[in-house]
Image (tube, rainbow, N blue to C red):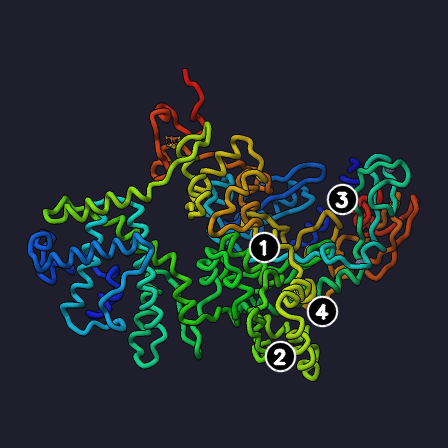
Amino acid sequence: MITLGKDEIAKYPFLADAGQYLKDKGFTLQQFGTDPDLRLSVDKALNRVLVSADGKIYKSDLIDGEASKEYILEREVFSFLLAIVLLKLTGMTTLIKRFALAEARRAEKFLEKDLGNISDESKKELAIKIIDDLFSIQIKKQDDFFIIPIANYLTHSINFHEREWKLINRHVENGFVFLTSHETVRLIRKELGNYISSKILNAKTPSMISGFEEPVEKLISLSKKFVTHTVSTGEYPPCIKHAIEVLEKGENLPHSGRFMLATFLLAKNQPVEQIAPLFKNAPDYNERVTLYQLNHLAGSSGSGTQYACPSCEKLKTQNLCFAIPECDNIFNPLQFGKKRK
Amino acid sequence: MQEKDVKFLEDTFKKYYFDNFDLIHVPERTSEREFGFQKFNSGMIRHISLKDDKELHLLLMQNSPSDVYCSNAYYSFPNLPMKEKDWKEADLIFDIDSKDLHLSCRSDHTVTKCNDCNKISKSNDQCTYCQSTKLDNKSLPCKNCIEASKIEVSKLLKILTDDFGIEENSINVYFSGNEGFHIYVYNSPFQELGSRERSELVDYIMFKGAIPETFGMKKLKPNRSLLPNFEDPGWRGRFSKEVYGSKSNKSKIVTELMTNGYSNFQKNLEQLSNKIGAKIDPNVTMDIHRIFRLPGSINSKSGLTKLFCKDLQKFDPYQEACILNDNSIEIKANCPIEFKLKNKKFGPYDNEIITVPSYSAAYMICKNLATIP
Ligand code: SF4
Ligand SMILES: [Zn+2]
Ligand SMILES: [Zn+2]
């Protein structure tokens, strides 16, 4: 694990062990709800979430990434940890996603600055280590550039659709891709967001703490704004409808979700050419690859095996199931809507 | 294919395998590979796993296959159905085929065979005898085809070693046994990449999707000092060589590029792709579940061997990869194209009964331009 200095925890609070941090400082969550001085941190936390829900980046009290006074620095970290507590109590995934994204953007700025730091070698080393530990990208410094192995670069860059991220538009030499500190950090933006949101999603939800009710109420009513309306997709089961919606919104559908959708539609005898456009909005769409993958699943590309649509049970474990009463007594999405004796 | 032809090819191939066990081996990490084979006039048998050379030789002797294949992928369970195999990684493979190079010589050595009346003609869309449109292309690639493919292979090798940093000794070049070359990269850092990432490698190698900014050309306030130099690594360097030609020319060309502007620059890049990109088959490199012709085995499209090329520049497939025996055999040949094998000229033949060495008979029968009477 990475050892962090005080001001580094303030910059990268998601690296800290939340419970341990509070304990080390000698506080309990209950105290934050009642102690009028500590309540300030709860307000700050609420503000931190609100700013992120608005699509903006929270401006910290850190000056140039350095806190002048110890208590300012502590309050920074508290506000992050308490924001997570509020989010958990609110339980709205949309808010968590937005918060994670905004926090990732914030950390990105510090990372970029630390990477490019020429006067303090240790800052640069730490940034390199964070990126390696979290995302297994081995960065080396060469002249003015940060160089990373091509294979490493590709696994991240294929998530971008801007042409400048294509390998052909990069300085490539002797197995490495040459990047600026800005580009290096940009490369991991999405993963940083995923890392933070999975950390929040996996955190334990505490029971309601007195003094936290009001901000939680506020967040719940705010999150209603973000609930999206479902479009009707006829006879398809909820899991499939959901997957189509996600793609239509241009959001990222995990591999398991794409697999489910593709195998379902193939089993319904939809031709590959009609299925492929569904994936068009996906952030990582590539027509050639999509067709290849669909043909592979359809068994028309040599292997000869057609892949089956996964069972409801399997989909449940992959968080792709959104069962409704009509789903009772079926084992596979393909059975949805068919009368059973 | 007719019974007699099948029998002849099976016997000839079998004799080849029996006499040349030292040429055909299972690849490393054998037990993680999927093998497959085909017999004349029948479908593919896949999902086979083999332990060693002995098992491979047994398979060759027992089944008299027309073609033998092996996966570039490594699986936990290569003999299970595709979805249960558990894919681990795959060697990086490139296919360069002269038929994809659009060479002008191609029409000189390509004929079509009518599926309805079996007659051979030069027409591409309609049989000149019965007007049928069911035609099969038959091409006997020439020396020029092979030399042009070699140039593409050299372009590819340069990118693999200079740009991708792959060690020369982990790259093997094979003659495909028919019209081109297969390039295998073993133990590279790219082993674990999936199709999407490999597709990016493909675009890089083929010079596809380049934008003017990469070559220093900007929409606003372009600056001539940002354009590529001869010494630049990767595509910028290769761009310079192709576009400027010589150092003395550079300044003049740069001025031209600057005056023509951004969108013309973009058009230039697209045209360049055809010239400086290496012409690989993108689908082959992206496919991580495919089985490939096994080195040392015979390609039933030609009767030539898929052979490792020790020295690519000197390599002559019609000499070195023609390894079937030279016992005389009588055939009825309908082969309007002249060709050369083992330094001997054959053809053209107009529906005549002739006696030729087995390797030459096999070549024509494989191409469907001769039969055993
Ligand atoms: S129960 Fe089955 S069909 Fe219904 S939503 Fe879940 S996975 Fe889909
Ligand atoms: Zn005809
Ligand atoms: Zn030719």
Callouts 4 and 3 on one subunit: yes
Local crowd at mark 1 within 10 Å, few (<14), some, or many (≥20)? some
Please give the name of the residue rendered at 29% of the width and 55% of the height, measured from the top-left corner.
A52
Which comes before the other along the chain, label 3 or label 2?
3
Callouts 1 and 2 on one subunit: yes
- Reading the image, the residue beneath label 3 is B9
Mark 1 belongs to chain: B
Q: Is residue A238 left or right of residue B36?
A: left
- Reading the image, the residue beneath label 1 is B285
Please give the name of the residue rendered at 43% of the width and 78% of the height, measured from the top-left corner.
A144
Q: CA distance from mark 3 to mark 2?
A: 53 Å
Which comes before the other along the chain, label 4 or label 3?
3
* Helix, strand or loop status at disc 2: loop
The answer to whether residue A201 shows anywhere in this view is: yes
Q: Residue reaching furthest bottom? A: B248
Mark 4 belongs to chain: B
Cβ–Cβ under 8 Å for marks 4 and 2: no
Local crowd at mark 3 within 10 Å, few (<14), some, or many (≥20)? many
Q: Nearer the viewer, residue B201 or B371?
A: B201
